[in-house]
Image (cartoon, coloured by chain):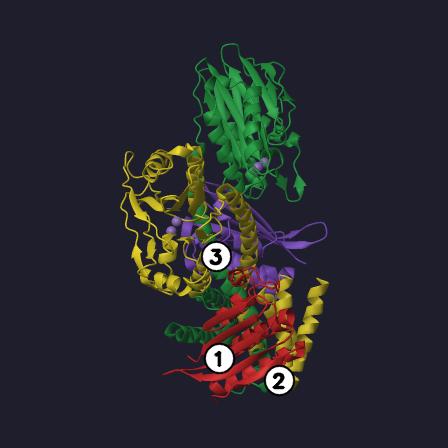
Chain colours: A green, B yellow, C red, D purple
Amino acid sequence: MSTLKLDLQDYKDLLKEYIRTKDEQALYQAEQFSKHSMQHNISPEEIINTHIQSMQDLFPDLPDDIQSAMDFLLETMVSYGLAYQEHRALRERQLELKSELSVAANMQKTLLKTYKPVTEGLEIGALSVPAKQMNGDYHHFVHDNEGSLGIAIADVIGKGVPAALCMSMIKYSMDSFPERQMVPSTVLENLNRVVERNVDPSMFVTMFYGLYNKEEHMFYYSSAGHEPGFYYDHSENTYHEIDASGLVLGVAPETEYKQYEKKIDEGDMVILLTDGVTECRQGDRFIEREEVLDIIKKYAHLEAQQIVEQVYKHFEKLQDFQLRDDFTLIILRRNV
Amino acid sequence: MSTLKLDLQDYKDLLKEYIRTKDEQALYQAEQFSKHSMQHNISPEEIINTHIQSMQDLFPDLPDDIQSAMDFLLETMVSYGLAYQEHRALRERQLELKSELSVAANMQKTLLKTYKPVTEGLEIGALSVPAKQMNGDYHHFVHDNEGSLGIAIADVIGKGVPAALCMSMIKYSMDSFPERQMVPSTVLENLNRVVERNVDPSMFVTMFYGLYNKEEHMFYYSSAGHEPGFYYDHSENTYHEIDASGLVLGVAPETEYKQYEKKIDEGDMVILLTDGVTECRQGDRFIEREEVLDIIKKYAHLEAQQIVEQVYKHFEKLQDFQLRDDFTLIILRRNV
Amino acid sequence: MDFQSCVNIKKEWDIVGARQLGRDIAKKIGFGTVDQARIATAISELARNIYLYAGNGKVCFEAIDDLNRRGLSIAAIDSGPGIEEISMAMEDGYTTSGGLGAGLPGVKRLMDEFDIISEPGKGTEIRVVKWLR
Amino acid sequence: MDFQSCVNIKKEWDIVGARQLGRDIAKKIGFGTVDQARIATAISELARNIYLYAGNGKVCFEAIDDLNRRGLSIAAIDSGPGIEEISMAMEDGYTTSGGLGAGLPGVKRLMDEFDIISEPGKGTEIRVVKWLR
Ligand SMILES: [Mn+2]
Ligand SMILES: [Mn+2]
Ligand SMILES: [Mn+2]
Ligand SMILES: [Mn+2]
């Protein structure tokens, strides 16, 4: 209460000063005054009221009509005051929710943690950034004992918490598969059964599974309706789409997945991604897949991890630092 | 833009009307005007500006000082305008989050669905209401083939999404236990290992598991640090605490749980709950466990399901319709 | 002035009548301009709820005295359809009126005390109090 | 008036100087009172960020012409510590200044165009534009 009275005096002094000098200093202080008032939870209609009282003090002979006009203004501000108070409450709840989700996101991070394998002759860059706090994209590296590297990349249709819950299931299932079954087509066929059985029919998962054999330099892969990646042919300096057809996970129980293969030569790159990369939006405009390639080309001289980071930075900025979808980008390059 | 100009005219007319009549009708319309403006995303400083322009039109000879004073007021409103705009954005995000969480909550509901068994001679009431959208309480009924009924009630320390993620794990684990092992102490010992292995050390779960044998009318139970329930002795018309000691789940890998037993006579009740029931708060005051009993006694003449619902209604109102914690209450009564 | 005065709410015009009566009593009790405006806004909201959702009801005013403070008590009573989910109606940001910041949470913010009893099918009774500071 | 004028920001007083210069140019371009006040608030925020977090920098103003519209372009440039997480700084409700509604999202709302380049350890450059409607 006493602070409020003090503020009235402050306001009156500032107002008087401004009427006298009309200079910027007083207006700057007016701004500081209102920020200070907001920190003390003063509603806009109270500012109007303070203004009215100051005017009555400063101009004792204020005409009745001017006075009435100010009362009218005060009346219109009450609803704004309510919005302002609601704002404060929402803001607090938002912070609460935020910290709750960040705990959940951390649990998810721990759950989905994957170790990027350090392999001689093979450079790997991987980055996955959720649009909201929880990630509905999934990627995972599996090292088997016979010198093969398994790479999973998946996207739950949907974002946030529901997608994260679904993702955990994929993770639990992947963990339960025996290691020798990590053949791309088999992995997708098994996962498809799990998703189909356990998840709401409205929820789908797209997934790409690749297996890189480091002895033969062969890349085997299958796709369950996943956004096609790119293949960089170093000898010809050309980029190609990695075509692979297959139904998304969770639609039909006994889906079979075709398995493809590709020889990887020195300097070649395999680029895997989710549609959060290719469907970046700039304002109302969707970017073209070509533009993603352009940016990758721009940074192709860097190390794989640096490429994925620079590409992310580019699209983060393009989207005004607000991702519309989870963003996952993986780049493999055979060096030797 | 054209709407905005129309509004200026509206405002001026209303203002003029109020200055002339000073009646409530004009003030009511002022309120409607500001609500309408808010629906059109008009900031408070624009209202002030509209006011200034109307004043200039209505009073062409307005003294300079009064004019300056209004400019000053406008300046103080800009920060409030920002808060207002932020409010709109937060509100939208909140609605988004809300609908996201409601999808997740539905997934959770499906996941945690339990069927309240319909058993002759045994009345069962059960109600579980999350404080936020996701439930961190868990309860589950298990019917085994030998005429026994298993009842699980658990509470993850923590609320919301993280607790829900943890809860799903409990559920997956419970499902994977073979049915003949549903002996209370064994259930808790098994679950304790799962929680200890998989969940962050900062997260604990309290749990009570009871097994009611319908032939012998015996109730076997064990507790992992769970809020004690109550036992109603019909012949003496007295209520007692169900004492059972045991460490919360997830602390030490090889914890053993003591198993207790109690004969259930006709008309007796077993009341199981989570601390969301006993730790209701009224303003700054925590209610006493005694008060929960008082309310249960008040409705004890009703059917079990009605009791739990009436008790919930009572505490919902007491807490101003905003639960501080997930609320789960189960009542069993032997009728015959 | 311990006397209770009521305004029946049947048409939109009655909202203005309720505001007028409420404001007069508030003025007599000694409330300042801001509080008068807030009380009027709360009355609008309560009366409009009756008008829109119950069709028929009343808003009653009473000057009240505590041990050492005075205040205005307002009761909005209808026999309309009632509120199915009170906790939802009391949540921020989900007003049916579509406006920002209003609805029942708004009324609660504008006043010092807020109490609601509602039974689906039977009606709603909302009692609010504003204390003179 | 295609000429760029700058105000160095070293002490709090310079914030007022930047506001003054910005407001003068805005007035000359033809901005009305509300927009002047908004521009001044945006300048405050930009200049205060420099004053508080970089210690040293400048705010520059330029009247600009598009094909068929005029506007005011403001650049706030410092060689301070830079912003580690731009997306976080651009999020609503998480301003370091503790105030409601201000911060960089506030500046973005007050103006029509907003562009930020920041490198940790090197500094920050924020360019904003307000078009005359
Ligand atoms: Mn997705
Ligand atoms: Mn996606
Ligand atoms: Mn809990
Ligand atoms: Mn609890």
Answer above or below: position of A186 versus A249.
Answer: above
Residue B214: image quadrant is: top left
Amino acid on which disc 2 is placed: Lys
The residues tagged by marks 2 and 3 sit, at their Cα atoms, a distance apart of 38 Å
Would residue D22 be visible to someone looking at this image? no
Front position among marks 2 and 1: 1
Chain name for mark 1: C
- The circle drawn on residue A91 is 3
- Which circle marks residue D3 in the picture? none
> Would you name the residue on which mark 1 appears?
C73
Q: Amino acid at mark 1?
A: Ser
Q: In the rendered image, which residue does mark 2 sit on?
A: B22
Circle 3 residues within 10 Å: few <14, some 14–19, many ≥20: many
Q: Position of residue B330 (x, y in %)?
A: 41, 52
The location of residue B16, given as percent across then percent down, is: 67, 80
Q: CA distance from mark 1 to mark 3?
A: 31 Å
Q: Amino acid at mark 3?
A: Arg
The quarter in which the N terminus of chain B is drawn is bottom right
Tell me: B85 left or right of B144: right
User: What is the secondary structure assignment of the residue under circle 3?
Assistant: helix
